[in-house]
Image (tube, rainbow, N blue to C red):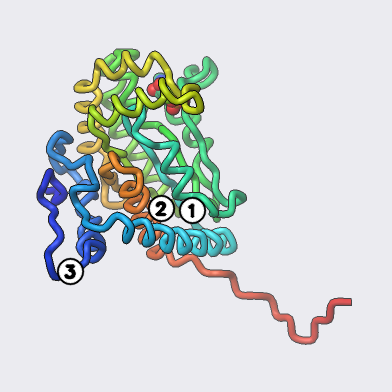
Amino acid sequence: MLILTKHSLRPGSDTSDLEVLMKDLDSLRIRPSAKVRLRDIETDGKDLVKDRAEYEQSFITLREELIELQARLYAESKQKLLVVFQAMDGGGKDGTIRSVFQGVNPQGVVVTSFKAPTALELAHDFLWRVHNAVPANGYIGVFNRSHYEDVLVVRVHKLVSENVWKPRFEMINAFEQLLTQTGTRIVKFFLHISKDEQKKRFEERINDPSKRWKFDPADLEKRKLWDDYQAAFEDMLESCSTKESPWFVIPADQNWFRDYAVCRILVETLREMKPRFPDPPDVSGVVVR
Ligand code: AMP
Ligand code: MG
């Protein structure tokens, strides 16, 4: 059961917001085989906290730690982290990647944005292009959209039939199991926004010349299918959140709350991975001339 249902998480009066949230971030994780009803899950972080400034400050501190942990992961070069983002259009995938990974050494982070497949990609199995993009030892791989599009957009728009997309849940679980058993940690984020918030963001894209390039008229057609998409996301969350490869549902109407939550979960994951600098070579007697 998710604890973070609408209006259920209220900070106690004697604990700080952050303490409460730190304990409860795990409640954003979808338990394996849990029933998921997105309309019952909070999209709005601001209802959950008293002090936005505290979060923003904490986010900066956490990001410093992310930068440090990534440096160790890269130097160690023995394990890898795969971070997957999915959301409705306007859900904030690009913005999250920009702000959470700001300052992280770009040499060790590889972001892949998955678009509609090319003819060559379509001529292969749906995981072919995905496997090719997974991170190597030492790297953080970030997926902006992912193999999950192959049980989302293709399903909602009937690009393939049910007997094609349905077995993919199991194929995805097997694929992710292969990755985790060969040294990849996986965390998956569904950025959960409300339909009203999507409307606001589309209007911003239309009205702000610097954001207009992002406006895609096709997104309006997809908005009409909001309920079908939410149902497809629910199925994805119910079918593919495992102990080793969990999905987190992030309340994403507020960027600052979203960034904090994602960064916090990444830092906790990397802490568990315990990346360490390799033992230095013996430098006794070495002189640089
Ligand atoms: P954007 O992320 O806004 O650049 O848009 C990328 C587009 O590619 C979205 O409309 C996705 O739904 C679409 N897309 C990504 N992966 C797939 C896929 N496997 N099959 C069909 N469409 C896809
Ligand atoms: Mg788009």
Q: Are marks 2 and 1 in contact (CB under 8 Å)?
A: yes
Q: Quadrant of ligand 1?
A: top left
Q: Where is residue 177 drawn, in percent x and y?
A: 36, 45
Disc 2 on helix, strand or loop?
A: strand
Q: Amino acid at mark 1?
A: Lys
Vertical position of residue 214 compared to residue 246: above or below: above
Mark 1 or mark 3, earlier in chain:
3
Nearer the observer, disc 1 or disc 3? 3
The answer for how far apart the CA atoms under marks 1 and 3 are is: 36 Å
Residue at (84%, 77%) from the top-left corner? 288
Residue at (47%, 18%) from the top-left corner? 122
Disc 1 on helix, strand or loop?
A: strand
Question: Looking at the image, which residue sits at the far bottom?
Answer: 285
Q: Is residue 22 visible?
A: yes
Q: Is mark 2 within 8 Å of ligand 1?
A: no
Quadrant containing the C terminus is bottom right
The answer for how far apart the CA atoms under marks 2 and 1 are is: 6 Å
* Residue for badge 2: 185
Is residue 105 rendered to the left or right of residue 148? right
Neighbor class of circle 2 (other Cα within 10 Å; few <14, some 14-19, many 20+) is many
Disc 3 on helix, strand or loop?
A: loop
Q: Amino acid at mark 2?
A: Arg
* Residue for badge 3: 15
Q: Quadrant of residue 170?
A: top left
Q: Are marks 1 and 3 in contact (CB under 8 Å)?
A: no
Nearer the observer, disc 3 or disc 2? 3
Q: Where is residue 148 drawn, in percent x and y?
A: 35, 31
* Residue for badge 1: 80
